[in-house]
Amino acid sequence: MSFPTFSGNSRRPRNVNMSGQRNLNPFAATTWTPSSSSNASKTVADAQAERRQRQQERAKIRAVESIQRTWRGHRVRRNLRDEQRQWLDKLYEGNSFSDPATRSSQALSAVVTSLDPSRSEDQARLERFATDLADSGCSALAAARPSQIRRLTSQLLALLRRYLYTYGFGPQIQGLNRLPPFIEKAIGSLVERDEISNILEKFTANFAGSSLEEHNQGSLLAAYILTLIRCFPALGDDIRMKLYMASVPLESGHSNSVKFFWEAMVETNIFTLIRSDEQGDTLALLKRQNSKQSSVVRDDSLWDREWRAILLFLELYVFVLRLTDDEDFAYPWTSAGFHTGSTSRLRQCMLTLTELKGLSLFLRNLAFTLYYNENELQEHGERLMQFATSNTTVDELFSPSAQDTPQKRKTQGAYNVISGVDFDTFRSTITTAMRMVYERDSRRQFLPREHWLMTSRFDMQNFMDNVVMEVERQRQLRKEGLDGDEVDMDEDEDEDEDNQDSFGRLPTGYTSQALRIERLREAHKKEQRKRLLAAVGPKLEILRNMPFIIPFDVRVKVFRKLVIVDKTRRRNGMLEADQWRMQVLHEFLDPHRARDRLERHHAKVRRGKVFEDAFAQFYQLQDGLKEPIQITFVDQFDIPEAGIDGGGVTKEFLTSVTKEAFTDDFSLFIANSKSALYPNPCALDQRQEKLREAGIKPDSEAWREDVLDILAQYEFLGRIIGKCLYEGILIDVVFAGFFLLKWAAAASDASYRANINDLREFDEELYNGMMRLKNYPGDVSELGLDFTIEDQVSLPNEPMRIATRQLLPNGDQIAVTNENKLLYINYVVRHRLVAQPFAVTRAFLTGLGTIIEPAWLSMFNQSELQRLVGGDSTDIDIEDLRRNTVYSGLYDPGDEGLEHPTIQMFWEVMQSLEDSQRRDVLKYVTSTPRAPLLGFSQLSPRFSIRDGGRDTTRLPSASTCVNLLKLPTYDSAQLLREKLLYAVSSGAGFDLS
């Protein structure tokens, strides 16, 4: 029935009773009358019951559909599987005439679709199929799914296409003309030497001017040079080299560019303020709140101009330091007469002692503020950003280009010292320059002894506890999976809603919008996580990136404390080995599981095969090597040696592993002219050459397994060294300084940068050759050198075989000249110290980092790390050794505390010995000639003396595994001295207690 309406629609609108009243008579009793039987709550309950009933009915319908989909055709599928099983049985009947590869290929589809591994008859069919696969080399599986391979290949090609589109500036595609020839030639001319020289001329002319406009132009030119270095990273060293080679025209004559930029840096107000800062005023300066220099703080152009001059000098000075050896570096204050006219350009660029002291103070104070007060600086940047946003006009607020600008800047870091250079890049430049100056000073001290310390900025009484607290706080954040993700969640949700609203107004698709929101969220979380970890651990940031401002003994105590905290956490408070083993036995309800876990920490090793057996049995432990291990030494007949592992056998095992691994038999490490060890850079090339001689192809599985095996040996050896550090066991091993620098740089912002001084430790003959090339007075191009290098790939005792490798793309076509010879030396140093041993060094450091956190090692320089591994090289303190000696047997002082006469004579003899003889005695007993860093109280196990019988004709004997000296009861000090020195010099009397 239709009803006409004014809208033209004749259909009657639907009436829905929303009142809950069942009586539809409008003239009947209403809710306002006493006779009303309506109940609103009852109506709501009825509606909910009806809704639940309808939901249950829909659920039943969906369940019925699911059951029908599952069981419809079940009988047909079951019969089909039975038929395929019968077909498989027929296929394997009379299989002696069938090819396994063909048969497995035919059976693959039936095996996948019809067999059930839980059925015993299907298990027999699977065994026959597996036998065919083993005989055919799994060729059926390799060719069974071409569609899957095609899909993965298409994805790989799509990824490569996108990569080439984004990063398509590699040497492989340099031949592609992406731009018109004129534009390409114009861009290439930006980094030519003539262009750099013209820029320097304009820079010096404007910088030397007196007007503000000329100074601003000079600042822009400095920014332009810095931009060139950032925009052409592959040509960065080439640009720096051209800056270094350029001469700066001045009224007084031509000057080298390094000195010119140094003078420009020294004249800045910023350098003067930060260098002389002793009260922490650098933070106020970086916030631009320093009232002492209102001009540089308030004037943006002056602020940018001074920072650009500073950054330009540091970029060039760091590059020059990489090319400078210690003699050239120290020439200004070691030579009798320093005349610029008679010295080389490199020596003319060096700074005097006074200048170096000022530069180091500037870098130290600035870097400290950038690390320790990073959180405060970022919060200051956010406040400035919010203030700038609050002053945004209406047109700027609703413009499309301003939609994501504040959030984007927030994810990239709210605070920047200078516009155009992000905070991390700026801090990395400062840190690199500071560490390079410090490395020179640590290798050949020229600054005052406590020049780098900044103890006045910390509460040194509670410093160690605060650091440990920061470590635990960061570990707890990582353990809980927070890392800043759940911090200020309300703020994150509000930001996400704002992002959705802002992106929703943009004319983009839903997928693009979701991706942009997700990327923004991830970037924000990453920045927030980084800031949170830095906020809870400012002292850790200092110890990781500039540890030398804290005294060495404090850092050693921090290291030991961190190890103890880690042991306590991993072992549930059971630091002693036996207590931990008992705890493991009671931890599992199943005793077999407990024994299995303890068995993984037990090994049987043979004398002379200690490294080989340890690698085979302990490599799979990974970081489980931190837990106590139990060692049983066996002889050639597999008979265990006498001895109880109370910690001493473990020490004997670790020292034996290191002795064997660092010998020439394994060729994993080689020694320089001073017997300092470093990873064999030719080890991987030599192994690969052996594989080629054996006819093994590089893409084969055998090749891959053999290469991974040698890298695994390096990784395991790194874990062994880490275990020694973890347990506080000293080993008599000396590592090369450049190799130890890589340990320290593993966790810091400034990674290891090879320089020519490190080449001396690597190969002194090669170093001398590079020095002769650097100082060659004639035309270097006449020597016929190019940018290639030859690597030895043959073993030491075999005929020499070499492989020629290029130092640069097309390096065989680039001749070495007087202009680029320093660049050639730099590339040779980088190849020998970084590129060639990269794989084996990374494997070793990976193993070392499995046991010892890289951040813990970054607290020390190369010489300090050597002391941490092998002990202190200072004179032996006999009184400290005497206070920390344990006596047993006849020499036990008992309750009275009186020393035995023989013990008194022993210490009198030790006092009379020279330091070298004392070291021989210490090595005879403990296997290392050096004392622990914090004294003999840290020696594990303690230095011990027990009686060795009453026969005075016997020599003293020692058990190095437990640091035990067995001393007979001699009658006189002279006899004791003679017997002791004879035993020490002859190496007699070692045994295992």
Image: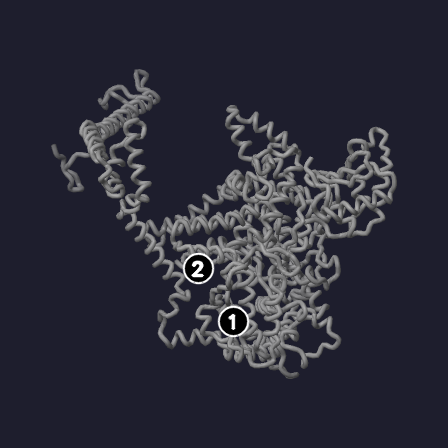
Question: Counting other residues with Cα less than 10 Å from the Cα at mark 2, is it few (<14), some (14-19), or many (20 or more)?
Answer: few
* Residue 422 at least partly seen: no
* Residue 878 at least partly seen: yes
Find residue 8 and report its horizontal and vertical position in percent.
Answer: 15, 42
- Picture quarter with the N terminus: top left
Q: Residue at x 49, y 43 (%)?
A: 485
Which numbered disc, 2 or 1, marks the residue that appears first in the sequence?
1
Q: Residue furthest left?
A: 1
Label count reads: 2
The quarter of the picture where residue 362 lies is bottom right
Q: Residue furthest top?
A: 35
Find residue 512 and report its horizontal and vertical position in percent.
Answer: 35, 52
**Disc sitting over residue 112 in the figure:** none
| Three-letter code for the amino acid on which mark 2 is drawn | Glu
Quick one: SS at disc 2?
helix
- Picture quarter with the C terminus: top right
Name above or below for residue 912 compared with residue 118: below
- Between the residue at mark 2 and the residue at mark 1, the CA separation in whole angstroms equals 42 Å
In the image, 937: left or right of 399? right
**Disc sitting over residue 238 in the figure:** 1
Find residue 539 and report its horizontal and vertical position in percent.
Answer: 64, 48
| Three-letter code for the amino acid on which mark 1 is drawn | Asp
The residue closer to the viewer here, 526 or 290, is 526
The residue closer to the viewer here, 852 or 672, is 672
